[in-house]
Image: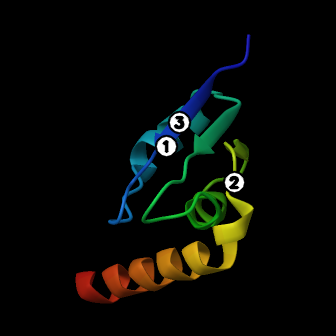
Amino acid sequence: MRLGLTAGYSGAQMSINLDLILEAERLGYDSVWTAEAYGSDAVTPLAWIGANTTKIRLGTGILQMPARAGRTSTTITRSAWATRMRR
């Protein structure tokens, strides 16, 4: 049996529970999945998760292709802003 974890949908505020994802990877989970809807995309959080993990496989649900470029840039902008604000 393969176990997967959903990172959920963070909405307009980018929020990733990286500790939970790292624990799932340590326990041998097969994959982590992200979702998208209005406010953020599924690809940008996966890039962050992929940069911080080594073995767990990454996946998305359905991607809304007509909105791809705008939504991805919006999520990147919000996450960059949040990173600067935490320092």
- Identify residue type, mark 3: Thr
Is residue 53 placed above or below 33 in the rendered structure?
A: below
Q: CA distance from mark 2 to mark 1?
A: 15 Å
Residue at x 35% of width, y 65% of height: 12
Q: Residues within 10 Å of mark 1 (few under 14, many from 20)?
A: many
In terms of sequence position, does the residue under pointer 2 or pointer 1 come before the other?
Answer: 1
Q: Say which amino acid is labelled 1.
A: Ala
Of discs 2 and 1, which sits in the foreground?
2
Q: Which residue is mark 3?
A: 6
Image quarter of the N terminus:
top right
Q: Position of residue 28 (x, y in %)?
A: 65, 28
Query: What residue is shown with label 2?
Result: 63
Three-letter amino acid code at the position of disc 2: Leu
> Seen in the image, is 35 located left or right of residue 78?
right
SS of the residue at dot 1?
strand
Residue that lies at the very extreme toward the front in this rendered image: 66
User: Does 68 sit above or below residue 8?
Assistant: below
The answer to whether 71 is drawn above or below residue 20 in the figure is: below
x and y percent of residue 77 in the render?
46, 85
Q: Residue at x 25, y 81 (%)?
A: 86
Helix, strand or loop at disc 3? strand
Q: Quick check: marks 3 and 1 in contact, CB under 8 Å?
A: yes
- The foreground one among 65 and 9 is 65
Please state the horizontal and vertical placement of residue 6, each as a whole percent of the image.
53, 36
Q: Which residue is mark 1?
A: 7
Q: CA distance from mark 3 to mark 2?
A: 15 Å
Secondary element under disc 2, as helix, strand or loop, is loop
In the picture, the disc for residue 25 is none
Q: Are marks 3 and 2 in contact (CB under 8 Å)?
A: no
